[in-house]
């Protein structure tokens, strides 16, 4: 049995296999065919943070695969009143076939997985957002921009950045990360990614200059400057991130026809300008839609591992 907690636990072949499976399922859905691979199965979805895409994509995906998804906010279940994670894991995993969790500390999801009898999927923690990266790479494949990709991530060194680091390190593409001083990526994550990059041939660079990162990039991406749980820091961050907005001037430094990706929700006028977001709306909302297809691939793949 496998859990999906971070991309570092997966090989390049496995990541590509999950994405290929998602693309196959997407193709049949578009042809009006519903694959009922998860008939009679249930997915428990524990949300300790807000969500639009993650909730809608997992719930819809599970329904389309013939199964059922339970939305469990921590306001509704005893976890939010102090029932231990290990007890919650043992109860839920005796009734459900898979669990998706969105929470704060990554250690919570690791503890849950330790006690769970069924696969656990990371639907975002403070440290990582691996399901988003499955959708992002699927989108790169669909737009034919995955080969020789040079990805520039401009913004906060956060859960998205850490997952980009692992994706690049596993798949072997070039990733340049530009963060303001004081908002760099976690040094342990960077060290691990650098180690993995030695095997895959990935080129990983970190700096504090967005222009340096974006110069000649084929894909530019960013994320909110204040993630969930950092609402109190918003005002300070807006000041500290001055010069980090992905706008037309910034996109001009990238390769001609460079693509823009954003996991959403986007804060126009902060990490991205209205013009950049709207002129890349097709790929950005395609990326959001791919959350559904990539995660269907993931759930079917995880279910198959259980035999
Ligand atoms: N990108 C993403 O995970 O969106 P939600 O927070 O809406 O789920
Ligand atoms: N970094 C953001 C991602 C939202 C999908 C957050 O954690 O809030």
Image: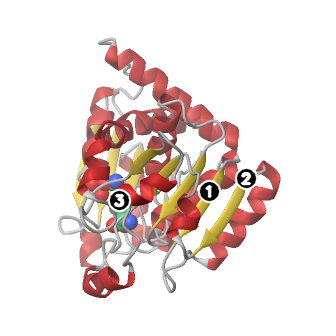
Say which residue label 3 marks.
Answer: 247
Which quadrant is the N terminus positioned in?
top right
- Label pair 3/2, CB-CB below 8 angstroms: no
Q: CA distance from mark 1 to mark 3?
A: 19 Å
Label 3, ligand 2: CB separation under 8 Å: no
Instruction: Please name the residue shown 40% across and 24% down the image.
Output: 26
Say which residue label 1 marks.
Answer: 175
Which label belongs to residue 90?
A: none
Is 94 left or right of 119, judged from the image as shown? left
Residue 120 appears in the rendering? no
Label 1, ligand 2: CB separation under 8 Å: no
Of badges 1 and 3, the one in the foreground is 3
Q: Quadrant of residue 231?
A: bottom left
Q: Nearer the viewer, residue 119 or 158?
A: 158
179 to 17, vertically: above or below: below
Mark 1 surroundings: few (<14), some (14-19) or many (≥20) residues within 10 A: many
Of badges 3 and 2, the one in the foreground is 3
- Label pair 1/3, CB-CB below 8 angstroms: no
Q: Quadrant of residue 243?
A: bottom left
Say which residue label 2 marks.
Answer: 202
- Label pair 1/2, CB-CB below 8 angstroms: yes
Q: Residue furthest right?
A: 199
Residue 301: percent from left, percent from top = 53, 34
Q: Secondary structure at mark 2?
A: loop
Residue 158: percent from left, percent from top = 47, 70
Residue 138: percent from left, percent from top = 49, 36
Q: Secondary structure at mark 1?
A: strand
Instruction: Please name the residue shown 38% across and 37% down the image.
Output: 290
281 to 102, vertically: above or below: above
Q: CA distance from mark 1 to mark 2?
A: 8 Å
Instruction: Please name the residue shown 33% across and 40% down the image.
Output: 42
Q: Nearer the viewer, residue 198 or 89?
A: 198
């Amino acid at each position: 049995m496998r859990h999906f907690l971070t991309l570092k636990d997966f090989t390049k072949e496995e990541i590509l296999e999950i994405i290929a499976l998602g693309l196959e399922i997407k193709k049949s859905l578009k042809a009006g065919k519903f694959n009922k691979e998860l008939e009679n199965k249930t997915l428990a979805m524990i949300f300790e943070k807000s969500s639009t895409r993650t909730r809608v994509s997992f719930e819809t995906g599970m329904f389309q695969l013939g199964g059922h998804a339970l939305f469990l906010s921590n306001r509704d279940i005893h976890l939010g009143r102090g029932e231990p994670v290990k007890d919650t894991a043992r109860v839920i995993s005796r009734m459900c076939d898979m669990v998706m969790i969105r929470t704060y500390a990554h250690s919570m999801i690791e503890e849950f997985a330790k006690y769970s009898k069924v696969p656990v999927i990371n639907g975002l923690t403070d440290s990582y957002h691996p399901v988003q990266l499955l959708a992002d790479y699927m989108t790169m494949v669909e737009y034919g921009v995955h080969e020789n990709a040079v990805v520039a991530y401009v913004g906060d060194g956060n859960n998205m950045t850490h997952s980009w680091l692992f994706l690049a390190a596993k798949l072997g593409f070039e990733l340049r990360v530009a963060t303001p001083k004081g908002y760099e990526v976690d040094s342990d994550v960077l060290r691990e990614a650098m180690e993995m990059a030695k095997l895959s041939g990935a080129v990983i660079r970190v700096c504090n200059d967005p222009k340096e990162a974006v110069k000649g990039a084929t894909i530019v991406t960013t994320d909110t400057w204040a993630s969930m749980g950092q609402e109190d820091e918003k005002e300070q961050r807006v000041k500290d991130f001055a010069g980090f907005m992905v706008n037309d001037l910034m996109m001009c430094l990238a390769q001609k026809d460079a693509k823009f990706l954003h996991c959403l929700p986007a804060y126009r006028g902060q990490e991205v300008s209205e013009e950049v977001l709207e002129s890349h709306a097709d790929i950005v909302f395609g990326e959001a839609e791919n959350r559904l297809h990539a995660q269907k691939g993931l759930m079917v793949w995880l279910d198959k591992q259980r035999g």
